[in-house]
Amino acid sequence: MDHLTDLKPPVAGKIKIEFKDVRKVYRIKKEHGGCGDFVVLDNINLNVYDGEFLTLVGPSGCGKSTILDLLAGLIPNSGGAILIDGRVIEGPAMDRGFVMQAYALFPWLNVRANVEFGLSIKKIPKKERRAISGHYLEMVGLTSFANRYPHELSGGMKQRVAIARALAFDPQVLLMDEPFAALDAQTRETLQDELLGLWEKTQKTVVFVTHAIDEAVYLADRIAVMAAGPGRITDVVNIKLSRPRQGSRGSAEFGWLRHKIGQYLKSGKEIQEDQPRAVITDVAEVIDAQAAL
């Protein structure tokens, strides 16, 4: 995977996040007695660039969510190092925001108070908190719902609140673990467009986990394709679809990228060193995109 680590997105800034030979191992009890190592992740080497939108896609059990937990500092790595701006991650910090699939809103707090939660931890004065929460509620279209409670909101609205809360304390990196997986298709596509709009405005570095190839292609600057047993990155694919992405799902290039990434997932194998680098960096340039039709 070292030959894939430095593949840059179409517009690359400085390196924001570095994975260096990262491993995650759990000590487990064996079925017939004794203990052994269960290797969740092995040899993870990847650079994520400042302002990049990177998606992780792979089968269940390949360690996608574990990578986010490591990045968030929620669990320690067993080997290697993970760095943000050249500093080793040693635990949770306010430079990273986390949006989960399960919303994780506090049911006893209204929408505004949920959005202001991280600001309260940072001891931001109340007047300033109100201005910041108002700004992000407006960005996600929930200004008129500021005094509602989570049980009064739809799934899509709850996820908007979770995104606003993650952005409100101004993290440098936004981690998203299948945030739209539980939503219906129409709401999911709407929120994908809204998320891209927020990302373009804020220019946060986003690491986004998904099972859906379409979603990965639609959102990403690059896609890191993973395989299981143990979890590892097998391919990194540049997505050079023009932005904004609305209307791109029906294009030949989109269809070809989706098809090729699906092939990588099925094979679970790394691209060999002797294959042309163009195959790795830009699938759609290797074969005429019209061939996808």
Image (tube, rainbow, N blue to C red):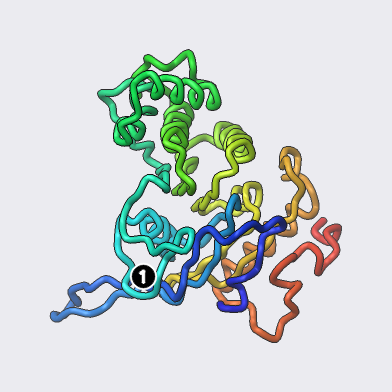
* Residue 146 image-quadrant placement: top left
In front here: 70 or 268?
70
Outermost residue to the bottom: 274
Where is residue 103, by image quadrant? top left
* Neighbourhood count class around disc 1 (C-alpha, 10 Å): few under 14, some 14–19, many 20 upward: many
Left/right of residue 196 with respect to residue 114 in the rendered view: right
- Seen in the picture, residue 255 relative to 189 is either above or below; the reply is below
Answer above or below: position of 254 versus 271. Answer: above
Which residue corresponds to mark 1?
40
Farthest residue, direction left:
33
Quadrant, the C terminus: bottom right
Residue 229 locus on image (x, y percent): 42, 74
Looking at the image, which is closer to me, 221 or 92?
A: 92
Q: Residue at horizontal 65%, vertical 47%? A: 218
Q: Which amino acid does label 1 sit on?
A: Val
Q: Can residue 18 be seen in this view?
A: yes
User: Where does the image place residue 78, in percent across and percent down from the top left?
Assistant: 31, 72
Residue 229 shows up from this direction: no
- Secondary structure beneath disc 1? strand
Residue plotted at (30% across, 64% down): 76
Q: Where is residue 164 in the image (x, y as percent from the top left)?
A: 46, 31
The image position of residue 191, as x and y in percent, is: 56, 34
Is residue 24 placed above or below 145 in the rendered structure?
below
Q: Residue at x 72, y 58 (%)?
A: 10
